[in-house]
Image (cartoon, rainbow, N blue to C red):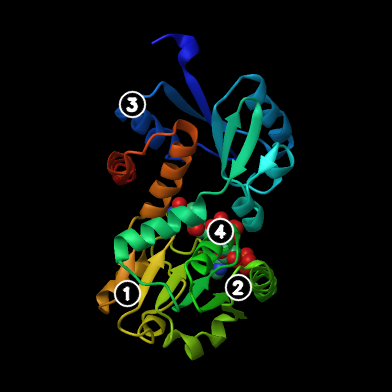
């Protein structure tokens, strides 16, 4: 392979040392025999604009963008696709002949993983999400697009949940009811939720014995409810273990990570992503930590 045939993909984040994206994408490129290579760059917020100019100047094929740059990066690229605009964040950039186009693959990645792994029917369903940050915004749009009827958002800082609920309501295409709730109000809605999603970092490594809800809270859910956690390190959080113990179906965050990466891979390469190998390699790396 000629050096100049190599296409480059960068990850722009701060920090990036813990990221499994380089490993996952490089294995996927190799598996598909594609002349691409993926490297992570730790970019301080003050250097983001120069880093984006660098992608253009060096002819990178694209990039992933992660915390804390997903919102700010929209100012420095040439176009933001409609869905990413509605979500208000970009996690994938594609360089089309010098024009940088931004996409968001978090929401569709989550939805793909949820439907594939649980078989849940979302049309007319009632969903409760814990947390009101960037990930909630992305997955809420995807869930609303899939036809849910009711969305409740609970957050430690209730004002953020109020703002997010109002903004989602104003920009949704459908007619779902969307409400913000305090944690204290949860018992009044748990018995109606067919999907509960943890979109907070509570329970994430190294605080693996923490859970955003108690087993008593989970026992209020109907027996057909699915409990989903966006956290993928650990793969099985305390919340999911408790849900499983009382007989509820569970959904892990690893699938979202794999599928957001798979959609980005497809934008850059035009080839179908080898999701099975991507999942295997990330799972193995997490086990070895
Ligand atoms: P974010 O924008 O920082 O939002 C974090 C949310 O969690 C906020 O609503 C925050 O509440 C709440 N929170 C934080 N600490 C809390 C605590 N101790 N108790 C209760 N609530 C707390 O983060 P994000 O980007 O939305 O990410 C959320 C989670 O999703 C993270 O665990 C992240 O790793 C995971 N994630 C996974 C994937 C994947 O591919 N699987 C992708 C994206 C994100 P306040 O508003 O009160 O601060």
Q: Which residue is mark 4?
A: 138
Tell me whether the residue at label 2 lies in contact with that at label 3, contact meaning CB atoms closer than 8 angstroms.
Answer: no
Q: Examine the rendered structure and indicate whether residue 53 appears above or below residue 139.
A: above
**Local secondary structure at mark 4:** helix
Q: Is mark 2 within 8 Å of ligand 1?
A: yes
How far apart marks 1 and 2 lie (CA) works out to 21 Å
Tell me the quarter of the picture where residue 46 sits. top right
User: Ligand 1: does it lie within 8 Å of the C-beta at label 1?
Assistant: no
Instruction: Locate ligand 1 by image quadrant.
Output: bottom right
**If you read the primary sequence from the N terminus, does the residue marked by circle 1 or circle 2 appear first?**
2
| First in sequence: mark 3 vs mark 1 | 3
Instruction: Report which residue position mark 2 lands on.
Output: 156
Along the polypeptide, which appears first: circle 4 or circle 1? 4
Kindly identify the residue that appears in the image at 40 percent across and 49 percent down: 259
Query: Gap in Å between the C-alphas at discs 4 and 1?
Result: 24 Å
Task: Name the residue carrying label 3.
Answer: 30
Q: Residues within 10 Å of mark 2 (few under 14, many from 20)?
A: some
Above or below 156: residue 108: above
Please tell me which residue is depicted at 51% across the width and 84% down the height of the picture. 186
Quadrant the N terminus occupies: top left
**Local crowd size for mark 1, using a 10 Å CA cut-off: few (<14), some (14–19), many (≥20):** many
């Amino acid at each position: 392979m000629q050096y100049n045939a190599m296409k480059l993909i960068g990850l722009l984040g701060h920090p990036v040392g813990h990221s499994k994206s380089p490993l996952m994408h490089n294995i996927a490129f190799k598996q598909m025999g594609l002349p691409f290579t993926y490297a992570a760059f730790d970019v301080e917020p003050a250097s983001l604009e120069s880093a984006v100019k660098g992608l253009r100047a060096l002819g990178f094929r694209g990039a992933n963008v992660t915390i804390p740059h997903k919102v700010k990066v929209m100012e420095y690229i040439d176009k933001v696709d409609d869905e990413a605009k509605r979500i208000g964040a970009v996690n994938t950039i594609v360089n089309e002949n010098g024009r940088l186009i931004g996409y968001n693959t978090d929401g569709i990645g989550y939805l793909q993983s949820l439907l594939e792994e649980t078989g849940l029917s979302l049309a007319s369903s009632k969903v409760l999400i814990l947390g009101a940050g960037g990930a909630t915004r992305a997955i809420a749009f995807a869930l609303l697009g899939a036809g849910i009827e009711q969305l409740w958002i609970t957050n430690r800082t209730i004002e953020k949940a109020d703002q997010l609920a109002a903004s989602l309501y104003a920009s949704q295409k459908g007619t779902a009811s969307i409400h913000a709730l305090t944690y204290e109000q949860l018992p009044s809605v748990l018995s109606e939720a067919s999907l509960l999603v943890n979109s907070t970092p509570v329970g994430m490594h190294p605080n693996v014995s923490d859970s955003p809800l108690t087993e008593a809270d989970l026992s209020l859910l109907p027996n057909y409810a699915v409990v989903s956690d966006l956290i993928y390190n650990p793969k099985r959080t305390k919340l999911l273990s408790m849900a499983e113990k009382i007989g509820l179906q569970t959904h892990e965050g690893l699938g979202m990570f794999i599928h957001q990466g798979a959609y980005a891979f497809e934008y850059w390469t035009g080839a179908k992503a080898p999701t099975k190998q991507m999942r295997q390699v990330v799972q193995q790396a997490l086990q070895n930590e």
